[in-house]
């Protein structure tokens, strides 16, 4: 690669065909410089595009993660609120209809014999009268 700048190699009118054929060496050197600069510009453009796309992807992922976190927080809040409403409703039902404690009842015989004056202590159980 030559050390002279492109400006020194280009003709004053900017037309590459205006070079004298005797300057083939200078022309090849100039073409190499132009090609190298074009490659460098393309590489730089490619790096810039890649950086922009990468940043855009990162930004989109950040937005998606924030949206996911927000949605999860909302779902958890709905679950919490629903459970609180169910608990309150359950407490309201219990307060409106207090549970009566179960009282132990004495075991009654399967057959009850009633006395003659028709007083029978065995209600609801098969009874025999005398």
Image (tube, rainbow, N blue to C red):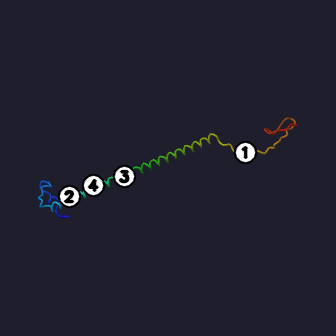
Q: Are marks 4 and 2 in contact (CB under 8 Å)?
A: no
- Residue 128's place in the image compared with 28, above or below, is above
Left of 63 or right of it: where is 42? left
Kindly report which numbered mark, 2 or 1, lies closer to the viewer in this rendering. Answer: 2
Measured in 3D between alpha carbons, the distance from the residue under mark 4 to the one under mark 1, in whole angstroms, is 89 Å
* Position of the N terminus by quadrant: bottom left
Helix, strand or loop under label 3: helix
User: Mark 3 or mark 4, which has the lower sequence index?
Assistant: 4
Give percent across and percent down for residue 124. Answer: 78, 38
Q: Which of 26 and 36 is in front in this view?
A: 26
State the SS at label 4. Answer: helix
Residue with the mark numbered 3: 57
Q: Earlier in the sequence, mark 3 or mark 1?
A: 3
Q: What is the spatial separation of the Cα atoms under label 3 and label 1, in whole angstroms?
A: 71 Å
x, y percent for residue 109: 81, 44
Q: Which mark, by number, is residue 113?
A: none
Q: Residue 45 has which mark? A: 4
Determine whether label 2 and label 1 are within 8 Å by CB. no
Q: Which is more N-terminal, label 3 or label 2? A: 2
Residue that carries the numbered disc 2 in the rendered image = 34
Seen as rendered, the residue at the extreme top is 118
User: Circles 2 and 3: CB distance less than 8 Å?
Assistant: no
Residue depicted at 12% across the width and 59% down the height:
21
Nearer the N terminus, badge 4 or badge 1?
4
Residue 28 position within the rendered picture, expressed as x and y whole percent measured from the top left: 18, 61
């Amino acid at each position: 690669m030559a050390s002279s700048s492109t400006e020194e190699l280009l003709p004053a009118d900017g037309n590459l065909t205006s070079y004298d054929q005797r300057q083939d060496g200078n022309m090849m050197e100039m073409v190499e410089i132009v090609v190298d600069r074009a490659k460098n510009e393309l590489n730089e453009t490619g790096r810039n595009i890649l950086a922009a796309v990468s940043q855009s992807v990162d930004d989109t992922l950040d937005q998606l993660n924030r949206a996911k976190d927000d949605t999860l927080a909302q779902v958890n809040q709905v679950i919490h609120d629903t459970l609180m409403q169910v608990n309150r409703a359950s407490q309201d039902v219990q307060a409106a209809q207090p549970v009566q404690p179960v009282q132990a009842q004495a075991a009654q015989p399967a057959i009850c014999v009633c006395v003659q004056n028709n007083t029978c202590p065995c209600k609801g159980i098969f009874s025999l009268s005398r």
